[in-house]
Amino acid sequence: MKKFFRKIGFDLMEKNKTGKYVKYAFGEIILVVFGILIALSINNWNENRKDVQIQLQLLKELK
């Protein structure tokens, strides 16, 4: 997959299609940012789930 995207980038640069290459690079950056944001939200969800489990266990111990 990585070779595929690299080949597209090199082909666009070699053919002097700078505008298309900039669009391609911008699109790739957006995909990376979205991937990071999804990973962060999954991590936050998991941490919240763990906190709720700890809170429930502490409540059980208090009873």
Image (tube, rainbow, N blue to C red):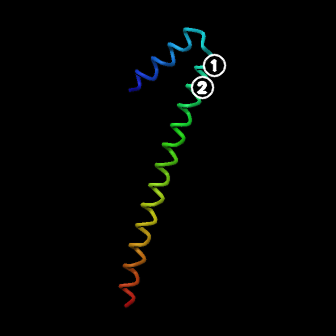
Q: Amino acid at mark 2?
A: Lys
In the displayed structure, 57 sits above or below 39; it is below
User: Badge 2 local density, few (<14 within 10 Å), some, or many (20+)?
Assistant: few
- Give the residue at x 54% y 41%: 33
Amino acid carrying label 1: it is Gly
Where residue 35 appears, as percent x and y from the top left, is 48, 42
Element under disc 1: helix
Q: Is residue 9 above or below residue 55?
A: above
Q: Nearer the viewer, residue 46 or 38?
A: 38
Q: Which mark is residue 45?
A: none
Residue bearing mark 2 = 23
Please rate how many residues cluster around mark 1, counting C-alpha atoms within 10 Å: few if below 14, some from 14 to 19, many from 20: few
Question: Residue 21, image x and y in percent?
Answer: 58, 20
| Label total for image | 2
Q: CA distance from mark 1 to mark 2?
A: 6 Å
Above or below: residue 44 compared with residue 5: below
Q: Looking at the figure, which quarter contains the C terminus?
A: bottom left
Q: Which residue is mark 1?
A: 19
Q: Are marks 1 and 2 in contact (CB under 8 Å)?
A: yes
Q: In the depicted view, which residue is nearer to us: 56 or 34?
A: 34
Q: Nearer the viewer, residue 37 or 12?
A: 12
Mark 2 element type: helix
**Residue 48 at x, y percent in the picture:** 46, 66
Which picture quadrant has residue 18?
top right
Residue at (49, 51) in percent of width and height: 40
